[in-house]
Amino acid sequence: MQVQVEGMSCGHCVKAVTRAITERDAAAKVNVDLSAGRVDVESRLSPTEVSAAITDAGYTVKGTPA
C-alpha cells in the first residue's frame, strides 16, 4: 500500500516511520520516498493500523492509504 505522509524531511524521519511500522509487523517491508512524501508498505497490517503507526510516530497521514 502507498501512504502519503506530511512532516518527513530527513534520515531520522525515515528511520522513525520505518521503526513505527516494523515494531507492529517485524516482517513488513517499508520504503520511504522523502521527496514524494510517500511511504510504500508491504505488511500484514491493515491500512488503518499502518496509518496509526505513522501517526503515533508524530507524522500526519494524508488521505486513506491505497
Image: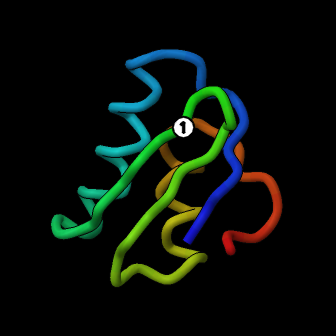
In the image, is 19 to the left or to the right of 31?
Answer: left
Q: Which residue is drawn at 59% across and 18% down?
A: 9
Q: How many labels does the image show?
A: 1
Q: Decide which of 36, 54 is in the foreground and name it.
A: 36
Direction from residue 64 to residue 3 in the image, left or right: left
* Local secondary structure at mark 1: strand
Q: Residue at x 36, y 54 (%)?
A: 30
User: x and y percent of residue 19 in the render?
Assistant: 29, 44
Residue 22: percent from left, percent from top: 26, 57
Give the vertical position of 48 relative to 5 (above or below).
Answer: below
Residue that appears at 60% across and 63% down: 2
Look at the picture and state if 37 lies above or below 35: below
Q: How crowded is mark 1: few (under 14 residues within 10 Å), some or many (20 or more)?
A: some
Quarter of the rendering occupied by the N terminus: bottom right
Q: In which quarter of the image is the C terminus?
A: bottom right
Identified at 55% across, 62% down, the residue is: 52
Q: Looking at the rendering, which quadrant does residue 29 occupy?
A: bottom left
**Quadrant of the image occupied by residue 44:** bottom left
Q: Percent x, y for residue 4? A: 70, 51
- Residue most toward the left? 26
Q: Position of residue 53 (x, y in %)?
A: 47, 57
